[in-house]
Image (cartoon, grey):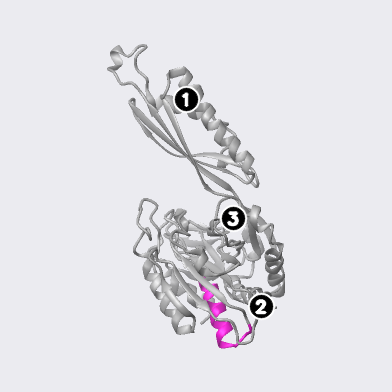
Amino acid sequence: MTAKERFLRYIAVETTSDEDSSASPSAQRELALSRMLREEMTVLGLRDVYIDECGNVIGTLPASPGTEAPAIALIAHVDTSPAASGANVRAREVLFTGEDIPLGHGETLSEQQFPAMAKLHGQRLLVTDGSTLLGADDKAGVAEIMTMAEKLLREDIPHGEIRVVFTTDEEVGRGTEGLDVASLRCRWGYTVDGGPLGEYEYENFNAASAVVRFRGVGIHPGSAKDIMKNAATIAMEFHGLLPADQVPEKTEGYEGFIHLTEMKGDVVSAELRYILRDHDRSLLEEKKARMTEAAAAINRRYGPQTVEVELSDTYYNMKEIVSQHPHLLRRAEDAFRAVGVEPVANAIRGGTDGAMLTWMGLPCPNLSTGGYNCHGVHEFIPVKALDLMPEMLIRLVQSFIA
């Protein structure tokens, strides 16, 4: 079965994760694909295949007889983002000539809107019908790993031991939840969860979150002078003390930000929620300090305990650890070149399972799947990427043979 055929099977299964759920997995629908993959992995010949209590699917591709190589892990996630519907995905294949591609439901895929399409003229693309996301993030990664595994087994291609891991809930920041990294018994791994073909990442944001709570004093507005403290307007004042240019819509590349993601409140109480990001951990600490300084200024103005800031770190930049293992990056670059693709290193303006796994003891750079425009109805993937990534992964795992 080709990676394209697998991919089309997988996207037919809705696996949208639920950011409001505390269950694990966050949505039971994710388990439908986990079970499908468990069965497929077993039929292919992987060993010790199981689904853990969080819905993660784990199996082992045994080393070829007589082959000496360290065990490595290849990881992708089954869930899709709740930012767009992942139900009843209807993909179709189109030849991109440079002309706009009508998707349906009033949506169009155009080079003008998405300039990266300029280098894809003449390629066949899998696109949506304009009402859902496609699911290349990350069912393309799942399909590419599975196709690699089948080819290694069916064609008796030499390889070391490979741990295949498909996680749930990556899209809601819980992709490594319940995963016992030590039990994988691997020194290194790769996530296959990236963008355009040839890209790879070993840098990501350091991340923190902030919950800012405000206490007001309520009283009838007719007699409020010098008594009322309006928590909602104090919250607005607090936000105004933060740097206006350090927001996602005004930053790019290695520039970090403080992003207001949610707000609610009234006169008596209010709450603001933020995410803080920076590739440089010292700069992230500065952003956290700006939050506490703003809170202190508000408390001086309106009285103690008017505002409280709860800060917590979420994940860290994998570069701090992965850079100690440069061979992981060199192997990825060589594998891309072996299939005729020039590699490009990018810094992620976000995080991945790989970042979490790296800090859990499994250095884990991220590799492309070939997909574009994830998390929305304009998502697409070139068929060429689905064809080449399994070949790239074969070259990659073979590079570990002694």
Q: Which mark is residue 114?
A: 3
Report the front residue among 150 and 208: 208
Q: Secondary structure at mark 3?
A: loop
Q: Which residue is mark 2?
A: 398
Inter-mark Cα distance, 1 to 3: 37 Å
Q: Earlier in the sequence, mark 2 or mark 3?
A: 3
The prevailing secondary structure element of the residues shown in magenta is helix
Asked whether residue 291 is drawn in magenta, I would say: no
Residue at 60 percent of width and 57 percent of height: 111
Q: Which mark is residue 142?
A: none
Tell me if I can see residue 71 in this picture.
Answer: yes
**Drawn side of residue 173 relative to residue 329, left or right:** left
The nearer-to-camera label among 2 and 1 is 2
Amino acid on which disc 1 is placed: Glu
Amino acid on which disc 2 is placed: Gln
Q: Quadrant of residue 84?
A: bottom left
Q: Earlier in the sequence, mark 1 or mark 3?
A: 3
Q: Which residue is mark 1?
A: 237
Q: Earlier in the sequence, mark 2 or mark 1?
A: 1
Amino acid on which disc 3 is placed: Phe
**How many numbered circles are shown?**
3
Picture quarter with the C terminus: bottom right
Tell me if I can see residue 370 in this picture.
Answer: no
Report the front residue among 67 and 33: 67
Q: Which residues are magenta?
A: 142-158
Tag 3: Cα neighbours inside 10 Å, few (<14), some, or many (≥20)?
A: few
